[in-house]
Image: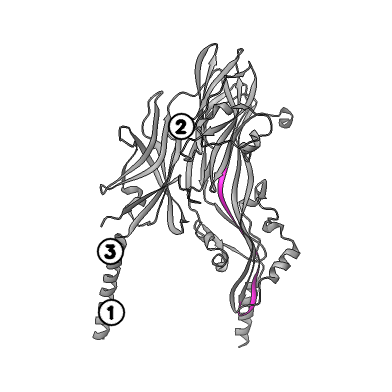
Amino acid sequence: MKIFGVSVAVITILGIGLFLSLRAVNSNEKLQAYSVRNNHTYAYTSELETFSVPFLINDQETIHTLEDAIVRTTITCEDSEMIVPVDLETLQFVEAVDFLNAPFYSYNFLFTIGVYAEDLIINIDRASLVVEYLSGEKLTLDIGSFHYTFEAFDSEHLSVHTRFNIHQHFDQYPNSVGLIFSLENKTASVIEIIDVNFNSNVAANMAYMRTFEGDMDAFLTLETVYGEAIDVQSEKSLQSSPIRLDSMMTCSYVVPFAYGDDLFAMHRYPIIIEYLFNGEKHRMVVDDFLFIRTKPFHVFHASIHAEVVFYAED
Amino acid sequence: MKKIVLSIIIVFAFMMVQSSVFASEYLTYQSIRFDRFGGQLLRDYTKSDYEQYYDMLGGRRFWGWRTVTVMNNEPVTFQKETRYVITNQGTSPINKSYHFRLTESSKVQLSASGNIGISTSGNVRGFSLGLDANIDGRISNERSTTEEERVEIRMKVDPNTALKVAVYGEGYITNGVGKYYRFFINARTGGWEVFVLTTEYFSVVKEVIDEDLRR
């Protein structure tokens, strides 16, 4: 009986020792995370509105996946001259995924904006999300660009009716490449549209903006609409003359996007229309809308996914 | 001895009872279209298709599944229901914000025919008797839990106008047939299908309400 008792004790001690040594090995393993470089661009609607920042990590048993371990979250620019507080609503576990042939766990930070100021416009071309933990550790994720406008929405002159996004796949990753929208001139005068933008690094390629006639469909392509391929990685070109919208008329327009070099995803965006009414310049902000919702880590895209490599602290 | 034999027969008879056909939300979409010509949903298998695919299964086995994959991660596009966010039947414009919560709990959807069953454990659904492990490793890794995002749209909706959100999307279909054996006896037979939703596309449409339809 004594021998049995001693054996059990030895086996238990060995088991605990093995468990602790394995834990020690695990804690030194390389942690690997990926973020998504998006063109984040939002228009303030209410303090309840959220936006999401997805990220991927190869270990669920770290503080980086614990909402309660997070003490502060901010969005900063490269030189830290602008620090925007964002309030973490929740950290959601989404799913286990295979990414680049390795097992990962997909999470989603859900934020509300932590500041409010009338007519403020925030523009950060190279933005990072900085997550600070109770332990003092900081996780910095490259999230692309971050833009937020607090401008008022209403226009007494114009009304936007329909919004259809045109998308295209880049290595299987869907991204917005154009917009079809219909505008109503509610006034007794002609309105001249001089610019369309998204308060983003992505521009509307105004030289190609034209009226659109035909059925709107979520699977329309730029090539179908224009009858030729349009390079969305070009620089923005200006229109030769303003587009006229006659009094009390409703007209549909199509405009392709100009991304320049960076093809960061833009799945949700507002529309800002600048126009002339009776010779005066006006600006209309159309609230942002989510046009594409995709699995951000369904496939790897070199220019969209940013890797973060760090080591777990002992 | 008689009782033992009778019990075994009852147990096997119970196992052989046809279970109901399980179907998922994606089968209610307005349309599902394969990118590749010749794509086929499980619901479109004809009797002769089943016979042809069963012939490809091979011989009986002592225990476990024999499966054949007919469509393997075939890309599809679909059109879902149109969500009516608001209809203004009043006489003055409504100018406010509307929000809809996007929740995800079913990016991977399953359906089955014959007596192949679907089991649910918490948020995770899977085919019964471990069929998942026999068809495609990728499928079992893509069980989603919950993800929620609150999207607000601030828009003016004029009288006699409806604000609608149209939903389109993309995904992959994997389907096939299978037979499950116990002691060389065929216990389950049927078709299985996995739909993986990868992307949804949303559009906003404001339309004048058709007065004739309202009457």
Amino acid residing under circle 3: Ala
Q: Chain of mark 2?
A: A
| Label placed on residue A24 | 3
Residue A28 in magenta stretch: no
Q: Give a yes or no on whether discs 3 and 2 share a subunit.
A: yes
| Label placed on residue A8 | 1
Horizontal and vertical percent position of residue A136: 25, 47
Horizontal and vertical percent position of residue A166: 59, 37
For the residues labelled 3 and 1, the Cα–Cα distance comes to 24 Å
> Foreground mark, 2 or 1?
2
Question: Which mark sits nearer the N-terminus, 2 or 1?
Answer: 1
- Give the overall secondary structure of the magenta segment: strand
Q: Are dots 3 and 1 in contact, CB under 8 Å?
A: no
Question: At x 38% / y 51%, what residue is drawn?
Answer: A33
- Magenta stretch in the rendered image: B182-200
Amino acid residing under circle 2: Ser
Q: Compared with residue A138, is residue B2 higher up or lower down, i.e. above or below?
A: below
Can residue B152 be seen here? The reply is no
Which quadrant: the N terminus of chain B?
Answer: bottom right
